Image: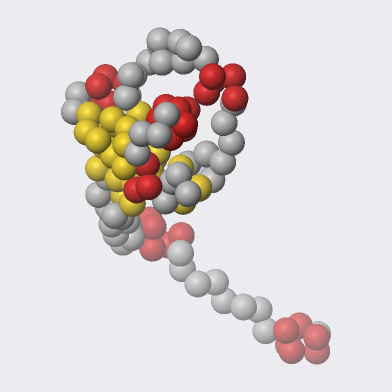
Amino acid sequence: MIFKRVGDGKPYPEHDTGLRAWSELPPRQIRLTDLVTTKRTLNLETLLSEDSTFYGDLFAHVVEWRGELYLEDGLHRALRAALQQRPVIHARVLVLRDVPPPPPDTSSDAASDTKEQPVPDTESDAAA
């Protein structure tokens, strides 16, 4: 198997990291067998294109979340490396920390919105 697992979608929270922020992360070597993909399919034309990395970042983008390394961008680079018998790629790694959900709003407005509503008495309605 080339990758640790083939995923479908991004299981981690949205991070909205722009290209400038990605470019500030130093690239490091990542073993292909440690990566979980976020795409099940790849455009073959992208894989075989000579200039597929001409625009954008030269390094793959990997998100580390909950102990897993997710290949967010650069699947074609990773597959090209595998086809050339290279077990690693150079990638920029963004580490996401788990952020606990915000506490529930206990203000009076929020409390009134979640107040239980009485259930009408169906027996007295039927008798009437």
The location of residue 87, given as percent across then percent down, is 35, 39
The location of residue 32, given as percent across then percent down, is 37, 42
Q: Give the side of residue 122 with respect to residue 80, left or right.
A: right
Q: Give the side of residue 54 with respect to residue 66, left or right.
A: right
Give the image quarter of residue 78: top left
Q: Which residue is found at the position 22% from the left and 29% from the top? A: 27
Is 88 above or below relative to 52?
below
The one of 91 and 14 positioned closer to us in this rendering: 91
Q: How many marks?
A: 0
Give the image quarter of residue 67: bottom left
Q: Give the side of residue 14 with respect to residue 42, left or right.
A: left
The location of residue 36, given as percent across then percent down, is 42, 47
- In the rendered view of the protein, which quadrant contains the C terminus? bottom right
The location of residue 47, given as percent across then percent down, is 52, 23
Q: Which residue is found at the position 27% from the left and 26% from the top? A: 22
The chosen color scheme is secondary structure
Is 29 above or below relative to 4?
above
Is 127 above or below relative to 97?
below
Q: Can residue 83 be seen by looking at this rendering?
A: yes
Q: Can residue 102 be seen by looking at this rendering?
A: no
Q: Which residue is found at the position 43% from the left and 46% from the top? A: 3
Q: Which residue is found at the position 41% from the left and 15% from the top? A: 53
Give the image quarter of residue 74: top left
